[in-house]
């Protein structure tokens, strides 16, 4: 049992970049190089750009509640859902950038923006796919005409 443990430890030391003592069997020698930490490479301009993205995404997400055009069906609904998809994409984009820069607060805000976009899309899509209590249509139906009389 002790020989097995020694053999496994020798393999681990070979993976870590240290050479095993001469005469001991170890697996193939591998050298692992550490990549410099990405947080050390983040400049002040990168941080400002990240927080500008977060601010613009938050403004866009907030202004979606004040959409000035009717968006009940048809083309206007497609335009609204396109704008909502921009909110979702902004959340993903900010999330990726904040992850690379190791900015936890910006990453949480990006996640919240992504969830907000999904909620906005669900609000319009669920009644149209039959999941909500109320029913809605993707296309605008013409108003029923009344017979002359």
Image: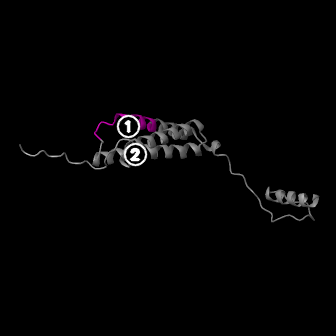
Asked if the residues shown at circle 2 and circle 1 are in contact, with their CB atoms under 8 angstroms apart, the answer is no
Q: Position of residue 61 (x, y in %)?
A: 42, 37
Using the image as rendered, state which of residue 147 and residue 9 is in the foreground: 147
Q: CA distance from mark 2 to mark 1?
A: 18 Å
How packed mark 2 is, by other alpha carbons closer than 10 Å (few <14, some 14-19, many 20 or more), is: some
Would residue 99 appear left or right of 83 to someone viewing this image? right
Q: Secondary structure at mark 2?
A: helix
Which quadrant does the C terminus fall into?
A: top left
Q: Which marked residue is nearer to the observer: mark 2 or mark 1?
A: 2
**Which residue in the structure is indicated by mark 1?**
64
Name which of mark 2 and mark 1 comes first in the sequence.
Answer: 1
Q: Is residue 133 magenta?
A: no
Please name whichever residue, 13 or 147, is drawn nearer the observer in this view of the structure: 147
Q: Image height check: is 23 above or below 56?
A: below
Q: Which span of residues is magenta-colored?
A: 56-70
In the image, residue 47 above or below residue 35: above
Q: How many marks?
A: 2
Residue at 33%, 37% (x, y): give it: 67
Is the N terminus in the top left, top right, bottom left or bottom right quadrant? bottom right
Majority SS type along the magenta span: helix
Q: Nearer the viewer, residue 127 or 85?
A: 127
In the drawing, what numbered circle is on residue 126?
Answer: 2
Q: Is residue 6 left or right of residue 14?
A: right
Residue 136, image x and y in percent?
Answer: 32, 45
């Amino acid at each position: 049992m002790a020989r097995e443990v020694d053999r496994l430890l020798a393999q681990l030391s070979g993976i870590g970049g240290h050479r095993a003592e001469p005469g001991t069997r170890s697996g193939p020698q591998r050298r692992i190089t550490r990549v410099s930490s990405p947080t050390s490479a983040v400049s002040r301009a990168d941080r400002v750009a990240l927080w500008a993205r977060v601010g613009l995404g938050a403004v866009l997400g907030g202004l979606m509640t004040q959409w000035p055009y009717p968006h009940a069906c048809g083309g206007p609904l497609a335009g609204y859902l396109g704008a909502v998809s921009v909110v979702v994409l902004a959340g993903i984009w900010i999330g990726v950038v904040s992850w690379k820069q190791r900015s936890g607060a910006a990453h949480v805000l990006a996640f919240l923006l992504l969830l907000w976009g999904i909620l906005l899309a669900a609000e319009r899509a669920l009644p149209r796919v039959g999941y909500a209590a109320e029913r809605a249509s993707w296309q605008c139906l013409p108003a029923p005409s009344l017979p002359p009389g």
